[in-house]
Amino acid sequence: MPTPSDDDFQTPLPTAPIDDTPTVSCSRCGTEWDLTYELDELKLGNQSVEQFALDHHRHTGHFPDDVSPWVTDCQQCPDGEQFLSEGAAQRWARTHARHARHEVALEHADEQHIVTPE
């Protein structure tokens, strides 16, 4: 069995820290934000980009670049919501259609389909 040498126990040199903080930009506002606040203060983790986009929409009336919401719109009552994930939008549309017995339009980018009550 080989004997360990001093080279085997050297401390590796430190490397530059990796900055993997997500950034979001909005060409309409002409600004780019890093999401340090959402990560460090709000502790949003993987939801930081989605929450920033929703907050940006609430405050400005539009979404940041590269964000296209899924929109649910009841065809009979004024109910509807916007979601950033397809699954959440479909779940809302199916639930509303089931409980209210109303058709719900589900739209994203250039596509639209109707969720009907069962």
Image (cartoon, rainbow, N blue to C red):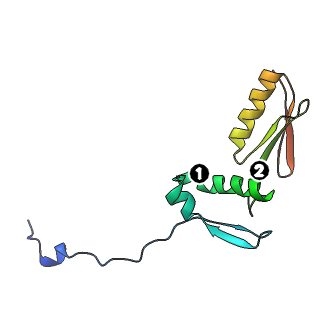
Q: Is residue 97 left or right of residue 16?
A: right
Q: Is residue 85 left or right of residue 1?
A: right
| Residue nearest the viewer, comparing 79 with 18 | 79
| Badge number at residue 100 | none
Residue 30 rendering spot, x and y as whole percentages: 76, 73
Name the amino acid, label 1: Gln
Q: Are marks 2 and 1 in contact (CB under 8 Å)?
A: no
Residue 28 rendering spot, x and y as whole percentages: 80, 68
Q: Residues within 10 Å of mark 1 (few under 14, many from 20)?
A: few
Query: Disc 1 on helix, strand or loop?
Result: helix
Residue matched to label 2: 69
Name the amino acid, label 2: Pro
Q: Give residue 48's quadrant in the image.
A: bottom right
The residue under the point 72% across, 43% down is: 86
The residue under the point 50% across, 59% down is: 40
Residue matched to label 1: 47
The residue furthest right is 76
- State the quadrant of the N terminus: bottom left
- State the quadrant of the C terminus: top right
The residue under the point 74% across, 27% down is: 95
Query: Disc 2 on helix, strand or loop?
Result: loop
The earlier-in-sequence mark between 2 and 1 is 1
